[in-house]
Image (cartoon, rainbow, N blue to C red):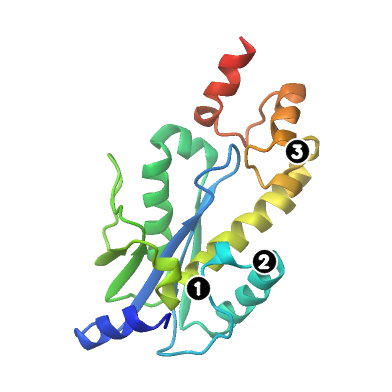
Amino acid sequence: MDLWTCEREQWESGFSVLCGVDEAGAGPLAGPVYAAAVILPRALDIPGLDDSKKLTEKRREALYEAVTAQAAAWSVAAVSAEEIDRLDILNARMLAMQRAIDGLSVKPDLCLIDGNRDHGSQVSITAPHLTLVGGDGKSASIAAASILAKVSRDRYVSRELDAQYPQYGFAKHKGYGTKLHYAMLDRYGPCPAHRRTFLKKWEARRT
């Protein structure tokens, strides 16, 4: 599929500056949720650009460098585990995406948002936007944002969180609920990086 089809449709509709927005890390038991916003030059050719979930870690890392070097503007933002617990994950995802949009050095005319949700119970995307289900496989801008969000989160969890709390093996599971992660929770209990609202089933099993 031509990843520029969505962008061309919006350019032809009169929008000039388009921004792709996506988030990463909604499901893990620990760490922040990340989002990225990316404005690409028109019809920029980045070989191999695709939905981050379809790419190997090595390919994502290479594309991260290509996107950040060639984008007209880009921004990455995060919402902490503490904020996730306070807001819930849907609101946290919306907040992360809006923060990423707000961090852009260029103001977009329209944001292409991956998914079908643009608001939670407390937080909404306030920038002009259009939601696109499966957008990271349909839009070059969203695909680029998905890569930046995923790589940024993986780097943070596997480097900073792993260094802070080496006993949990964050570099191996990136905070997801793997067998190893649950085994380390059983041994050490949760740390400040854990999302306590995501541990209710684990806590119930232990009582």
**Lower sequence index among marks 1 and 2:** 2
Q: Nearer the viewer, residue 164 or 201?
A: 201
Looking at the picture, which amino acid does disc 3 mark? Tyr
| Mark 3–mark 2 distance (CA, rounded to whole Å) | 26 Å
Are dots 1 and 2 in contact, CB under 8 Å? Answer: no
Closest to the camera, between mark 3 and mark 2, is 2
Are dots 3 and 1 in contact, CB under 8 Å? Answer: no
Binning the other alpha carbons within 10 Å of mark 1 as few (below 14), some (14 to 19) or many (20 upward) gives many
Query: What label sits on residue 144 in the rendered view?
Result: 1
Mark 2 highlights which residue?
Answer: 56
Q: Nearer the viewer, residue 170 or 127?
A: 170
Quarter holding the C terminus? top right
Q: Residue furthest top?
A: 207
Mark 3 highlights which residue?
Answer: 165
**Lower sequence index among marks 3 and 2:** 2
Looking at the picture, which amino acid does disc 1 mark? Ala
Residue positioned 49% across, 28% down in the render:
197
